[in-house]
């Protein structure tokens, strides 16, 4: 029997990846990295890692003869031959494990929004059609990938959209933030004078006046890397006293204002309060389930 | 230094790192996390969050990719490949593009598959066709594009149509210049074939998983490098500075393609990002973003460069850039 240190090392790495993923799911931090709708996918990845770890266990010890046989297979993979190269390639594999276990996830904030540069976007012709036409269900129910999505039914969606048009106060709750934002941004003139209630973090640009700030949320399609920021410009006298990245809950009347030569919706704030960062800082696109 | 000394040193280091991982994973909860984090700049924490999120997102697809690659390695023989792929170059390219279009893959999962296929004797140009259409054209991508652009089928349709045409053109041109398999390490097929013939089904399945593991360790490090660079750019380079360059449709198209390259988004998730640029750029530039990103990006380049010759990878990137740009310009001119 021979002990193969390299194979043992690989088994540990596979186990560590399994552990990292399971750990993220158990303590809920996974929501800080990916859209919870894709939970199932990354759980599956954890199971596959565990399975590969199990297989790898059998390669740690081997009889001499079998090892020669194995080598035939492994020669077709380009193993770095020199120990230094090997060390480098394993350090690369270990790096995400170390940072994953050691460093806490960070919620994206105003700094990231500034880098992306798409917070205040004027209306676009295409977005007027937002979610009005029907979705082909065969396209939708594709594979297991979307099974775990927290879809809402068409009826519920219509109900939400009706409330956008008729409620006294437009309450932009997390689950309707993206479709409401899309609608209001597409046709702001339709909602002038309505009261909007929303939460978000403070984001400021240099071109803002002292009584202005943007209240923003990050929209996550798949993972944090594809986050884009959406939100409204707001106006109230104390705006200059509030720091970037502060979370606020506000209520205000919708107006239209000029920004960078575009017409954009703006909230004149009637009441506001500072809140702590919510448990779910991100919002997600809504998928409609059609029965 | 003596080689055996190095190896001993390496083994020793491996044991230490092994212990370190276990130590940190177990002890972390008991330690004061604040102690570590307050010395690390917030921007690095943000980089790390984006980096890990790309990895977590890509891992399932890479695992599927390496499992399929393992399957091809063990269960598909060179004779079968020879029988299936048409001799005619155009027919081979068309078939590979169509198969790629039917095959739901992600750009990082597809590299190990293509590598195995090419090692099994699939012509390199057919491999390219498969590599390009696999991540670009599939039901999930169509659906997310459809959703992101306000349930408008036009953009999704153009993305698929123009993307397919571009992939065909690229593979055909590649077929004129590259004949050999372009792999960095030439496969030793004889030995594998012999040992495989004798093996029972169970042993072959077992071998398949072992290959998948080896494939993961080869591909994994390039995925990690690519993801790290992509997140580094996202954290420290402002997209806004890039966007200011984009005046006029030619330069705005190039800017969008550059953005698609450095962001390295998954093709299933890039549609919403593309949609957020609608008010800044003409539709043709957005389309270039949507087609170019799935075909080639930073993360993908690292993986390709680990498998194929540098000359081949660079030619492929240049050709994809020119072709996508031309196709989209042609469309804008119509």
Image: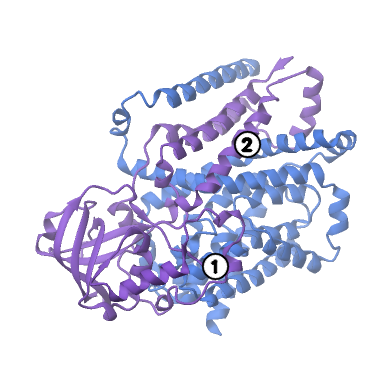
Quarter occupied by the N terminus of chain B:
top right
Snapshot colouring: by chain
B28, A22: nearer the viewer: A22
- Asked whether, in this view, residue B158 is left or right of residue A236, the answer is right
| B94 shown above or below A74 | below
Q: Secondary structure at mark 1?
A: loop
The residue indicated by pointer 2 is B217
Write the residue at 81% across / 51% down: B121
The location of residue A43, given as percent across then percent down, is 54, 42
B15, A256: nearer the viewer: A256
Q: Which chain is purple?
A: A
| B95 shown above or below A58 | below
The location of residue B177, given as percent across then percent down, is 74, 61
Write the residue at 35% across / 67% down: B244
Quarter occupied by the C terminus of chain B:
bottom right
Q: Which chain is blue?
A: B
Mark-to-mark CA distance, 2 and 1: 43 Å
The location of residue A165, given as percent across then percent down, is 31, 76
Circle 1 chain: A
Q: Residues within 10 Å of mark 1 (few under 14, many from 20)?
A: few
């Amino acid at each position: 029997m021979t002990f193969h240190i390299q194979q043992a090392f690989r088994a540990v790495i596979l186990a560590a990846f399994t552990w990292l993923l399971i750990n993220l799911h158990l303590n809920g931090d996974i929501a800080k990295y990916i859209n919870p709708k894709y939970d199932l996918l990354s759980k599956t990845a954890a199971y596959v890692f565990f399975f590969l770890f199990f297989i790898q266990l059998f390669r740690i010890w081997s009889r001499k003869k079998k090892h020669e046989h194995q080598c035939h297979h492994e020669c077709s993979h380009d193993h770095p031959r020199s120990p230094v190269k090997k060390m480098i390639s394993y350090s690369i594999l270990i790096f995400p494990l170390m940072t994953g276990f050691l460093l806490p996830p960070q919620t994206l904030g105003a700094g990231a929004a500034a880098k992306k540069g798409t917070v205040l976007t004027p209306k676009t012709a295409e977005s007027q059609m937002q979610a009005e036409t029907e979705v082909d269900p065969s396209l939708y129910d594709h594979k297991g990938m979307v099974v775990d999505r927290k879809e809402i039914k068409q009826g519920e969606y219509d109900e939400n959209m009706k409330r956008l048009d008729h409620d006294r106060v437009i309450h932009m709750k997390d689950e309707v933030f993206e479709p409401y934002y899309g609608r209001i941004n597409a046709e702001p003139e339709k909602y002038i004078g309505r009261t909007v209630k929303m939460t978000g973090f403070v984001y400021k640009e240099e071109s803002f006046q002292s009584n202005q700030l943007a209240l923003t949320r990050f929209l996550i399609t798949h993972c944090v890397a594809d986050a884009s920021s959406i939100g409204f410009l707001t106006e109230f006298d104390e705006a200059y006293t509030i720091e970037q990245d502060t979370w606020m809950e506000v209520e205000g009347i919708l107006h239209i204002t000029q920004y960078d030569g575009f017409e954009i919706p703006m909230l004149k704030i009637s009441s506001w309060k500072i809140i702590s960062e919510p448990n779910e800082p991100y919002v997600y696109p809504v998928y409609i389930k059609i029965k | 230094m003596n080689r055996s000394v190095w190896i001993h040193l390496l083994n020793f280091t491996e044991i230490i790192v092994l212990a370190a991982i276990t130590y940190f994973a177990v002890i972390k909860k008991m330690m004061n996390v604040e102690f570590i984090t307050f010395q690390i700049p917030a921007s690095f924490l943000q980089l790390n969050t984006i980096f890990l999120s790309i990895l977590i997102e890509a891992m399932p697809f890479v695992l599927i990719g390496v499992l399929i690659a393992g399957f091809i390695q063990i269960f598909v023989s060179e004779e079968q490949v020879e029988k299936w792929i048409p001799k005619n170059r155009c027919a081979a390219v068309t078939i590979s593009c169509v198969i790629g279009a039917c095959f739901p893959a992600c750009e990082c999962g597809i590299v190990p598959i293509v590598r195995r296929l090419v090692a099994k004797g699939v012509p390199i140009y057919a491999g390219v066709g498969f590599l390009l259409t696999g991540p670009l054209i599939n039901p999930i991508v169509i659906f997310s594009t459809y959703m992101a652009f306000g349930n408008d089928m036009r953009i999704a349709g153009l993305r698929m149509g123009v993307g397919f045409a571009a992939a065909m053109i690229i593979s055909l041109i590649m077929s004129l210049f590259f004949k050999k398999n372009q792999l960095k390490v030439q496969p030793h097929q004889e030995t594998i074939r012999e040992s495989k013939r004798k093996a029972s089904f169970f042993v072959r399945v077992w071998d398949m998983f072992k290959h998948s593991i080896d494939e993961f360790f080869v591909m994994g490090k390039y995925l990690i490098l690519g993801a790290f660079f992509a997140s580094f750019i996202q954290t420290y380079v402002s997209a806004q500075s890039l966007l200011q360059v984009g005046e006029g449709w030619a330069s705005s198209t190039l800017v969008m393609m550059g953005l698609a390259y450095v962001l390295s988004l998954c093709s299933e998730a890039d549609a919403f990002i593309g949609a957020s640029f609608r008010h800044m750029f003409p539709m043709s530039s957005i389309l270039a973003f949507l087609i170019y990103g799935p075909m080639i990006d930073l993360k993908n380049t690292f993986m390709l460069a680990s498998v194929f010759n540098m000359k081949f990878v660079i030619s492929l990137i240049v050709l994809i850039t020119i072709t996508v740009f031309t196709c989209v310009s042609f469309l804008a001119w119509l």
